[in-house]
Image: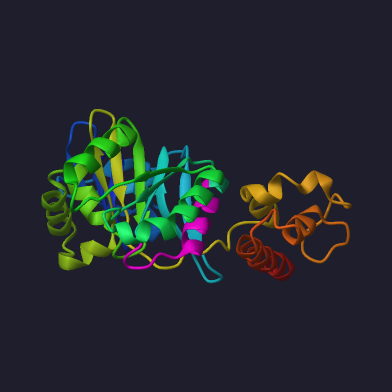
Amino acid sequence: MKTNKEFKARVIATHGKHQFVKKDNGETFEATRRGKKKDVVVGDIVLCLQTSTEQVSIEKIEPRKSLLYRSDELRTKPLAANIDQVALVFATRPSYNKQFIWKAILAAHAADIPMLIIRNKKDFIDDNETVKPFIEQLKELGAKVVEVSATSQPQETEDVLKPLFADKVTLLIGQSGMGKSTILNLLVKDAEQRTQEYSKALNLGKQTTTSTRWFDYGKDGAIVDSPGFQEFGLAHLTLNDIMSGIPEVRDRVEHCRFTNCRHLEEPGCAIKLAVENGEIDLERYSFYKGLANAAINSSKMN
């Protein structure tokens, strides 16, 4: 029986060509994108056309207030839309990747989305001294950092994170094994049950663990859980994005000899001088050089 009824809904889960949308009144539907496009992201507000009691097609995506994505030379991977902050979880065990975290901060800056860093497993006290300089560096880069132990100190962890997540739409990201799922289950008590519901509705079985999902949180907030991944590509960023997103570079560019200085091989470069004087960490400068050269090479090819 056809109804041809239009309504707006939130995309709360995606997997391939399958979407799961929810109306304000809580009704949920399996949906497909008109024209088989793959441009729908969790968090999107979409205009849907209900052609039967069970079938919904996504006709249009409403304008987004924010979008975070990662990319490499081959493709772009949107992570979530209409989010208020990004919360990145890392831990010293298994070992964390500094560049992954730096890249996530840079991507969030380019998307104009605040970043929260959650250092999990702080109960590994033997690691505290070695990780302390990195945490201080993250704070200097403009990220808010909190330290928790989600498994050994669940109540304390919830008390720390609850006010930081309240009334916000938060995208939860991190490398595999850092405790992201443990934190989600602490904050969203029925997360596992709702994951199973998504799985059943999308007929995906265990594959849903590789999908991004939206969980309502509190009165007006939500937590968007993304699958763990090991690389955070930034192929979509321009050289200007990179320079403006790295504070050590951004704060010194006006002192360079040339206004179009790329801070690589140019004479009279204030950034290179700061590296030589020990004012900029050599590892951070190498990080900048790698991204800058990639952006320059990409612009030459386009």
Q: Nearer the viewer, residue 105 or 294?
A: 105
Q: Nearer the viewer, residue 13 or 235?
A: 235
Q: Nearer the viewer, residue 295 or 102?
A: 102
The picture places residue 261, in percent across and down from the top left corner, at 82, 56
By secondary structure, the bulk of the magenta-drawn segment is best described as helix
The picture places residue 26, in percent across and down from the top left corner, at 17, 36
Magenta range: 92-108
Residue shown at 70% from the left, 53% from the top: 279
Q: Is residue 145 above or below residue 179?
A: above
- Judged left or right of residue 239, residue 287 is left
Residue shown at 88% from the left, 52% from the top: 258
The picture places residue 83, in percent across and down from the top left corner, at 40, 40
Residue shown at 70% from the left, 58% from the top: 278
On the image, which quarter does residue 166 sit in? Answer: top left
- Judged left or right of residue 73, residue 66 is left
- Judged left or right of residue 250, residue 90 is left
User: Any magenta on residue 273?
Assistant: no
On the image, which quarter does residue 215 sit in? Answer: top left
